[in-house]
């Protein structure tokens, strides 16, 4: 992803995370988030009892959407579609270090058995920056998407296979 996008993700602490529940109904929630340095993985730490957890606790990746940036003051947003999954035990130490480094208050729940980490991996994204024109009307200043950068058939590949 573009450096401006990576910086935008690093600057933000909250995102909207949306998945389908087991019954097919959509569910969205605002959550604290963190990300790997290259922002190809975004993490959420939440409780198992919430609706967003129903499909994820089955252990298989599920389609998901994440939106970062919904402030009229900032006027930038990143929309992403991809897959979400539970973070496995082998990746847990790295994810905890990343997430608790950014969201320090969450660390007090580290050993709570009712909490778990979600990994979101984007397959498509669009980053948009708006501005006000001379008449004060909000217009899109710049928009870039994975389709713009990687072609319309871009699907997430292992990091070593991605071409940017």
Image: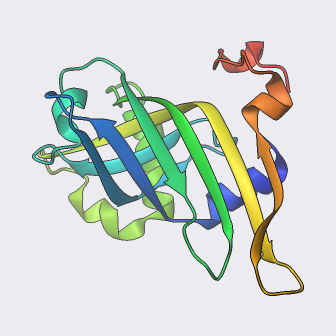
State whether residue 82 is above or below residue 115: above
Q: Is residue 43 above or below residue 57?
A: below
Q: At 25% from the left edge and 29% from the top edge, which residue is drawn?
A: 56
Q: Quadrant of the N terminus?
A: top right
Tell me which residue sits at (13%, 28%) in the image.
23
Quadrant of the rendering where the C terminus is positioned: top right
Q: Residue furthest right?
A: 134
Q: Taking 16 as reference, is 114 left or right?
A: left
Q: Nearer the viewer, residue 35 or 77?
A: 77
Identified at 63% across, 20% down, the residue is 156
Taking 148 as reference, is 51 above or below it? below
Vertical relation: 45 (above or below) 119 = below
25 and 164: which one is in front? 25
Picture residue at 39% right of the left edge, 48% below the top:
17
Q: What is the quadrant of residue 116 in the picture?
A: top left
- Residue 46's x, y, as percent? 25, 51
Out of 18 and 136, give the one closest to the viewer. Answer: 136
Percent coordinates x, y for residue 51 in the rendering: 16, 44
């Amino acid at each position: 992803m573009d450096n401006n996008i990576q910086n935008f993700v690093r600057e933000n602490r909250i995102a909207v995370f949306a998945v389908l529940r087991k019954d097919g109904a959509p569910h969205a929630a605002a959550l604290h988030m963190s990300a790997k340095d290259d922002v190809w993985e975004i993490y959420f730490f939440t409780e198992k009892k919430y609706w967003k957890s129903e499909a994820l606790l089955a252990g298989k990746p599920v389609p998901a959407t994440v939106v970062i940036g919904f402030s009229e003051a900032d006027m930038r947003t990143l929309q992403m579609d991809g897959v979400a999954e539970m973070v496995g035990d082998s990746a847990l130490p790295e994810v905890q270090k990343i997430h608790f480094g950014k969201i320090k208050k969450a660390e007090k729940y580290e050993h709570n058995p009712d909490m778990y980490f979600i990994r979101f991996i984007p397959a498509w994204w669009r980053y948009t920056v708006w501005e006000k024109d001379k008449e004060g009307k909000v217009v899109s200043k710049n928009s870039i998407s994975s389709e713009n950068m990687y072609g319309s058939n871009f699907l997430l590949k292992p990091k070593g296979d991605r071409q940017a």
